[in-house]
Amino acid sequence: MGFDRTALSEIDWQSLFHAYGPATEVPSLIERLAIPGSGAVNDELLWSMLHQGSRYDSTVAALPFLIDIALDPNTSDRVVLLEFIRFSAMSFSGDRLDWRAQRELQRTASERGCWDAVTQRHDELRVLLTDPDSGVAASSLVLLSWTGDDHFNTREGIDVGLRSGDWRTRLTAYLATTVLGHPPGMEFMAEPAEPDRFGWAVAALRFDEGRCPPTAIDEICLAIEQDQTQLNEAAFFSGDEPEHVAKMALREVPHELRPHASKTLLRIMDSGWVQGSQALEVYLALWLGEPATSKAERVTVEEHGALEALPPRIGTWDLRRRGGRQPLNELSAYGLPDSPERLEAWLHSRR
């Protein structure tokens, strides 16, 4: 098993670019990645093809070879390499726990080229779902689900993951089924004990409709409120940082649970701007929907009531810790006044 060295040598790498210039050294990097124990997966040159989530023409050209190397069981650090491949396909995950939303975010030629380079290899990548290395199996499930592979084998991989004795694998499976939009079996929707609760809560909020318990909301909010050391250790298995997964999930809180979610988010805002700014972002999305600067002109009575709860809380934040009294961009994204004082005056003028 391995990659096609002849095909690698036929590419004009000098004409391709990464974050720091021409991609002339990429072929030698790919060669080293195929050598067990080389440590090349940590090479700055590899990540220069994915600098801060940006994709380049060199990333598109390199992906077929990187996938070949990841498929080789003799390759070292396959979990990290699979994460690189997934991140190359989708970069940062946007605002919705839905693989279609990830595809829509790929707009440039390099972004769509990377997405296509991965999805065209789904058939081969599914082999990794049964890899004896549980980390490789979980990482491949993340890659396949977040890039929309709805194949029977992927669904079977989710079912196997939900029955796993490893909580990280169960977390992977809960989030994979959520991203693909397939509800898990009813036996998996019962409220579990720690540390399974985060993945279960995200799935319950997405699929349990009117039966979603308020405790699921509380569990998801914990990922914003507290240092989630344990969840962060499993970040490779979730497709994104836990707090961002939480923010995406909370956008789908049903109307009847909004008061409960709002109460929890407002309590987090009381703790200060570090966690509070993330809670503010979710709170605004919960009540006002997607950011739009025209939204302030169309605020309903119910939404106005929700906004009334904000000034007393964000007014206590020490915004100097944000580098001075910067405007609250979370508010201005909706066309709302961007400081606690101006927001309070604006709300008062519309009573």
Image (cartoon, grey):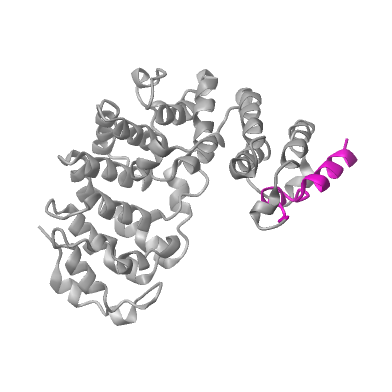
Residue 231 percent location from the top left of the image: 40, 37
Residues in magenta? 325-351
Q: Nearer the viewer, residue 341 or 229?
A: 229
Quadrant in the picture for the C terminus: top right
Q: Nearer the viewer, residue 262 or 327?
A: 327
Residue 172 percent location from the top left of the image: 34, 36
Q: Nearer the viewer, residue 35 or 147?
A: 35
| Residue at image location 44% in from the left, 44% down from the top | 241
Q: Is residue 24 left or right of residue 331?
A: left
Taking the magenta stretch, the answer to whether it contains residue 328 is: yes
Q: Is residue 269 left or right of residue 246?
A: right
Q: Is residue 261 left or right of residue 337?
A: left
| Residue at image location 69% in from the left, 53% down from the top | 320
Quadrant in the picture for the N terminus: bottom left
Q: In terms of image quadrants, where is residue 287? A: top right
* Above or below 265: residue 8: below
| Residue at image location 30% in from the left, 66% down from the top | 46
Taking the magenta stretch, the answer to whether it contains residue 276 is: no
Residue sitting at the far left: 1
Q: Is residue 105 left or right of residue 17?
A: right
Query: For the image shown, how many numbered marks are present on the structure?
Result: 0
**Taking the image as drawn, is residue 54 in sight?**
no
Residue 278 percent location from the top left of the image: 59, 43
Residue 163 percent location from the top left of the image: 26, 25
**Taking the image as drawn, is residue 6 in sight?**
yes
Q: In terms of image quadrants, where is residue 152? A: top left
| Residue at image location 78% in from the left, 31% down from the top | 305
